[in-house]
Amino acid sequence: MPLITNNEQRTTNNLDITRIRQDFPILNQTLYGKPLAYFDNGATTQKPQVVLDTITHFYNSINANIHRGVHKLSEESTKAYEEARETVRSFINAKNTNEVIFTSGATASINMVAFSFGETFVHEGDEVIVSEMEHHSNIVPWQMLCERKKAKLIVLPFDDNGELIIDKLDELITSKTRILAVTHVSNSLGTVNPIKEIIKRAHKYNVPVLIDGAQGVKHGIVDVQDLDADFYAIAGHKIYGPTGIGVLYGKEKLLNAMVPWQGGGDMISTVSFEKTVYNELPFKFEAGTANYIGAAGLSSAIKYYKSVGIEAATAYEMELLNYATSKLLSIDGLRIIGNAQHKAPIVSFLVDNIHPYDTGMILDKMGIAVRTGNHCTQPVIDHFGIDGTVRASLAFYNTFEEIDRLIDGVKKIKEMFG
Ligand code: PLP
């Protein structure tokens, strides 16, 4: 990874960061008398004013339940919901909107596949592969499936740099393998996995692949057709959208073959006590009142992100990452956990023997928000035999000056612990 070693090399890739920051009202505040430096974007991102306005406008002027009314508001509400689906479709380049299912988040998307795909295609003695660097959301649903079906969970390991040992796949995939579930970007190590190559290898054995895109979709352009992903899970709140809305992309052929995961209104075509006929895609997987206002908020967030420029934003975030990495490494006794060749702007570290919670709590008093602990990736933390890490996860509204504050803060903490 090319490291930036002096300040002259700071570049914003033509983004006007001062102006961009004005789009995010929450960033313009002080905590404990210090300006907020928000480095917890891996957990959730902040929301631009345009997303907040979309939500307020919806509640103030359009709100009505979708798909079920003939009145004007219901029609407008439905139109906005289906337009949001189209915005997502084009954002990830899905073939058609039948492949875009709205969920409550990445966790719900993965659970849906673990249940619906699992009920349809996984049987006793079958195998499911996940990687060692998965978020708990991409481990536990598969474990639950394996318990239910008496199937076996197989783990694809990573090396000490935090890179998946993908050559092992040829060994791990057997005639019993039914699905491979792997993250696009590790939320605790920052690793960007070579998912196109992983999918290609799995497809050689006719094994479908679910990609956990919770962190992936905000670091560069995702094209599900180019990747040939079978499923891709998205969390709206991690791409500048509201909480409680997410997406499951799935290939139409697979989604059509799968049983629904929840029953209720909207997912049916006809109901009688003798037999219920399920609705077509995408509604078959959207039981109950959908989060249509969340969907509109997500659509607004995607449009905003595109207007900033996804490629420019990603390039700037990589400049920030390189800068933060080189500055952190200049601190004696600081260790970075996760040194893959290809990283997203996430840096996990430990300073001497200082507990990550202590580092996080003292940084907080300096107005600097980082996350500490296992980041819902207990197996990653166990791999390194540590208690957890301090994680700074960056977004395009962060600045080099904020990183300087983080570095100064870490240096002060190191002095305090002597
Ligand atoms: N997968 C990864 C890699 C994540 O980082 C997260 C959240 O941090 C999730 C899944 C779960 O996302 P959500 O809690 O939004 O469902």
Image: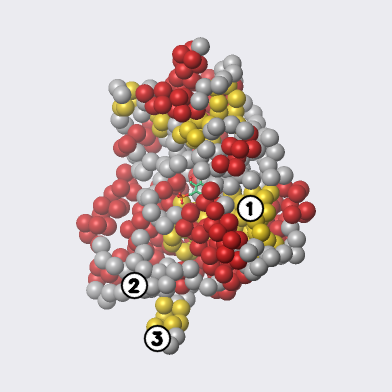
Residue on which the image places disc 1? 130
Q: Is mark 1 on a helix, strand or loop?
A: strand
Residue at image point 26% right, 52% down: 56
Q: Contact (CB < 8 A) between labels 1 and 2?
A: no
How far apart marks 3 and 2 lie (CA) works out to 23 Å
Count of all numbered marks drawn on residues in the image: 3
Name the residue beneath numbered marker 3. Answer: 273
Outermost residue toward the left? 60
- Label 2 belongs to which residue? 67
Would you say the beta carbon of the disc 2 residue lies within 8 angstroms of ligand 1? Answer: no
The residue under the point 67% across, 34% down is 161
Quadrant of image for the N terminus:
top right
Q: What residue type is labelled 3?
A: Phe
- Looking at the image, residue 81 sits to the left or right of residue 157; the answer is left
| x then y, percent, for residue 295 | 38, 58
Q: Where is residue 118 in the image (x, y as percent from the top left)?
A: 58, 66
Residue at image point 36% right, 68% down:
288
Label 2 environment density (alpha carbons within 10 Å; few <14, some 14–19, many ≥20): some
The answer to whether the residues at label 3 and label 1 have Cβ atoms under 8 Å apart is no
| Closer to us: 391 or 220 | 391
Any part of residue 218 in sight? yes
State which mark lies toward you, 3 or 1: 3
Q: Describe residue 111's horizontal placement relative to residue 288 as left or right.
A: right
Callout 1 amino acid: Val
Where on the picture, by quarter, is residue 364? top left
Task: Give the crowd class for mark 1: few <14, some 14-19, many >=20 residues within 10 Å.
Answer: many
For marks 3 and 1, the one nearer the N-term is: 1
Amino acid residing under circle 2: His
Q: How far apart are marks 1 and 2 (CA)?
A: 37 Å
Q: Residue at the location (28% across, 74% down)?
A: 69
Query: Measured from the top left, where is residue 385 in percent x and y?
Result: 62, 33
Of label 1 and label 2, which has the lower sequence position?
A: 2
